[in-house]
Image: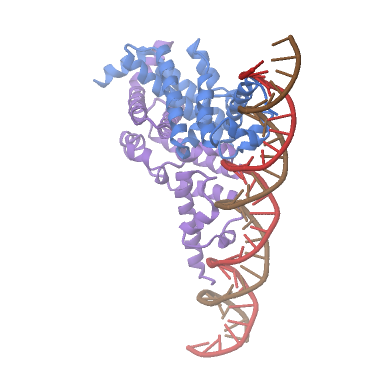
Chain colours: A blue, B purple, C red, D brown
Amino acid sequence: MKVSQEQKAQNRSRILTEAGRLFREKGFDAVSVAEVMKAAGMTHGGFYGHFQSKDDLVAQTIAHAGGSQSMIDDLSVWIDTYLSEPHREHPEQGCPMAALAGFMRQQAPEARASMARVLAAQIATLTDVMPGADSAERRRAAIGNWSAMVGALILARSIDNPALSDELLSETRAWIDAGRSPDAKSAARNTAT
Amino acid sequence: MKVSQEQKAQNRSRILTEAGRLFREKGFDAVSVAEVMKAAGMTHGGFYGHFQSKDDLVAQTIAHAGGSQSMIDDLSVWIDTYLSEPHREHPEQGCPMAALAGFMRQQAPEARASMARVLAAQIATLTDVMPGADSAERRRAAIGNWSAMVGALILARSIDNPALSDELLSETRAWIDAGRSPDAKSAARNTAT
DNA sequence: TGTACATCAGTGAACGCGCGTTCACTGATGTAC
DNA sequence: TGTACATCAGTGAACGCGCGTTCACTGATGTAC
């Protein structure tokens, strides 16, 4: 049952897409190789023609999911969308860092290196659109805001208390807004010195 | 081999302590019931005399680890310690939320409810020591800062890039400081309106 | 206080199950002529 | 362009393994008298 080279490339891409969806939904351990292959429309035996091991799939899936991240058009709208109910409820098609960062400590070095590249790219993208007097200040704001956004989303997803979960998203959103103005930061710096 | 009631209570407590350590280090799935019992100095068969199931252990471990959280004496020192290298390197004896929040989406409702109570308590504790004009503003600052702290620590632990990992901790620390002054927040509010 | 015995905390073998991975096989692909 | 055949992508049974959980058993505990 050999398939064409084009078909093989499509199959490989489909495995990565479905693995990205399933891993974000359930975590790496709770998704079997057979489950990924079935979602991609194949049987489990063919998996090792595409990847060396499940660890290899994990590393490549992180790079694949991290590579297809959205551009930031309007920063305020982008933050609103990130800290929204739909994003909280649908990790399987959302931010791979928020969905997977908590699992990375137990992963192989290649996977952790993939995640480092995805995170570095995200911080660089955010730094470009961040307000601030100089690039160091913009990068600091990017890291601080990104930590708060990822943290709020992970915490909001981790609990069984809808009111507290909603509050985490909305108050973190408001907290980011309160600190984001360059005037506020200048005032803080002037007050401190 | 029956043991005294006092010994049984001590054994149960030891199971919870060791489970808290192992779960924070490896995650729930990667730690077996037998491994927890061995760490507590017993064999796996006795486990079900103490807990209904592994899910039950998970829920009770979260409550146990969350209940023994440190008081906040000096806020600035406490934040420094939280966003420090030792804390990043030793999740097994650190914040249970940073170590376990990423695993909670896949856990049973009881475990998620336990985590909600631990998180609510942490936010309440932080709110009490947070500067701010009124309680709503202090709670907002507590939620924003806590999200940033947890997010920075989770991201710093998730990658294989020491320089970026260090930067996440130190820059999030600096970002929190820049926004924490009440003067800065007032300035932001005045500028916005 | 001393004795007989019912209780029950902990032991360790055993269970069914799903996992990652391997491998002999199949048959469509794509190339040599 | 047509044909023969080597290649190899995908199939599905099988493997060894570790998991959560069960259970018959052991023997120290603690109580009834």
Left or right position of B150 against D24: left
Q: Position of residue A95 (x, y in %)?
A: 53, 24
Q: Tell which residue pokes out farthest to the left in this image.
A: A193
Above or below B59: residue B187: above
- Rendering quarter of residue B125: top left
Q: Position of residue A116 (x, y in %)?
A: 42, 27
- Name which quarter of the figure residue C28 lies in: top right
| Camera-nearest residue between A50 and A115 | A50
Q: Nearer the viewer, residue A20 or D27?
A: A20
Q: From this viewpoint, is residue B180 visible?
A: yes
Instruction: Tell me the quadrant of the picture where the C terminus of chain B can be found.
Output: top left
* Residue name at image x 47 percent, y 30 percent: A151
Residue A2 against residue B56 in the figure, above or below: above
Residue B71: x and y in percent read 38, 43
Residue B108 visible to an observer of this rendering? no
Query: Which corner quadrant holds the N terminus of chain B?
Result: bottom right
Q: Residue at x 54, y 54 (%)?
A: B33
Identify the residue shown where x is 57% and y is 24%: A94
Q: Is residue B176 above or below residue B6?
A: above
Task: Specify whether A62 is left or right of B176.
Answer: right
Q: Quadrant of residue B181?
A: top left
Most foreground residue, B107 or C1: B107
Give whichever of C15, A135 is nearer the camera: C15
Spot occupied by residue A155 in the image (x, y as percentages of width and height): 51, 33
Q: Tell how many labels.
A: 0
